[in-house]
Amino acid sequence: MAQVVNRNESWGKSIRVENVQALADMIGGGGGEIPEIYIRPELDVGLTDQEAAIDDHNLPVIHMNRLLDPSFSVSTEESAKLDYACKEWGFFQLVNHGIDGELIDKMEGDLKEFFKLPLEEKELFAPLPGGLQGYGQKLLVNEEKLEWHDLLFLITQPLDDRNMKFWPTNPPTFRSTLERFSLELKRVLKSLFEVIGMKLGLKPEVISRVLSEYQGLRMHYYPPCPKASKVLGLNPHSDVGILTLLLQVGDVQGLQIKKNGKWLSVEAIQHALVVNVGDVLEILTNGKYISVEHRVTVSNKKERLSIAAHHRPKPDCMVGPLQELLHEEEEHNYNYKTMSYDEYIQLYLSGKVEGKSHMNSMRANK
Ligand SMILES: O=C(O)CCC(=O)C(=O)O
Ligand SMILES: [Fe+2]
């Protein structure tokens, strides 16, 4: 089957690629081989790696209710854990975040139903030419190999008519579920960032500047793949924004993070959010908090879905190490340049993205 890669000239490296779910169905039905462009001969993620219960007990688990506990000693202890997680791991599991379990189940159910719709129907929600929002558009992060997943991308904050017109109307409850869920994610992000800001000693105006941001939901569908050990659902990358909150749907794991040169799988804990530091937060903190490379492996048996809420500053927001966070000895020791978020994205899109290599062009020349 011919691989269709239509480059969309007007938005950097955004492309439309062949539908992976349809491809997986066809291969599953005995209708052909996996195109070479998905196969990575050097890779061997190993089925046992993916199916085994992974020992990630070291990935910190933060209890949001403790962060907000009125008792000073409880909240101080938990925020110290949060600070440690952002410095050493760049990732943590967030539990007791207060999002209603029923709402999460509803969100997961509606999303599964959406992906089950016939392709023609899902494609009614394909992005407009040059646009990103909708079903089927992807960012091209690696020119050589394609990723084994389909994507529904929607901007959910600011919640205005301009953005909401891209939201699918099937299943019928999808829009209202998305609206409620994204507001809850925004509430969690705000509380988390306020704690982080306090821990770092940020002025309230800086906290609110960083928090006036965009929220985009990347809703992923990873079909099962007969050659699961030779494909990747997502290429190694770091997230460009401030913080990402991720819901792994059901108990299917697949997310792996790079720690000390090794890939570690992140457990899928029901209703927990996996939170990670994005490049912008790494830059703002002059590298104290780390934005860590991660990737997604797929299963040969089970489909996997996930919802990643990416939080990004407004395009004109200046991104650079915050003066107030630098210790005296660091005063003139900026590790990163300062530029607007928009300039940063242009720079990001102008190079080949491999893991965190794009961050090299953000480093200050010493
Ligand atoms: O599907 C996942 O677990 C990870 C998604 C992700 O890394 C992203 O959307 O940036
Ligand atoms: Fe990511």
Image: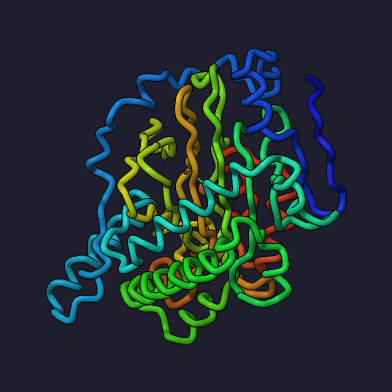
Query: Furthest-bottom residue in view?
Result: 205
235 relative position to 55: left or right: right
* Image point (39%, 37%), residue name: 253
Looking at the picture, how far across and down is residue 30, in whole percent? 64, 13
Task: Specify whether residue 236 is in view.
Answer: yes
Q: Quadrant of residue 197?
A: bottom left
Residue at the (77%, 54%) spot, across then down: 127
Front one among 364 and 343: 343
Residue ID at (63%, 46%): 151
Which quarter of the image is occupied by the N terminus? top right
Give left or right: position of 234 versus 137: left
Residue 221 found in image quarter? top right
Residue 167 locus on image (x, y percent): 66, 62
Q: Quadrant of the C terminus?
A: bottom right
Q: Position of residue 65 (x, y in %)?
A: 23, 70
Residue toward you, 170 or 80: 170
Provide residue 256's location: percent of width, then percent of height.
42, 37
- Taking the image as shown, residue 9 lies to the left or right of residue 112, namely right
Residue in view at x 59 percent, y 56 percent: 171
Foreground residue among 345 and 234: 234
Q: Is residue 260 left or right of residue 118?
A: left
Image height of 225 relative to 128, above or below: above
Q: Quadrant of residue 351?
A: top right
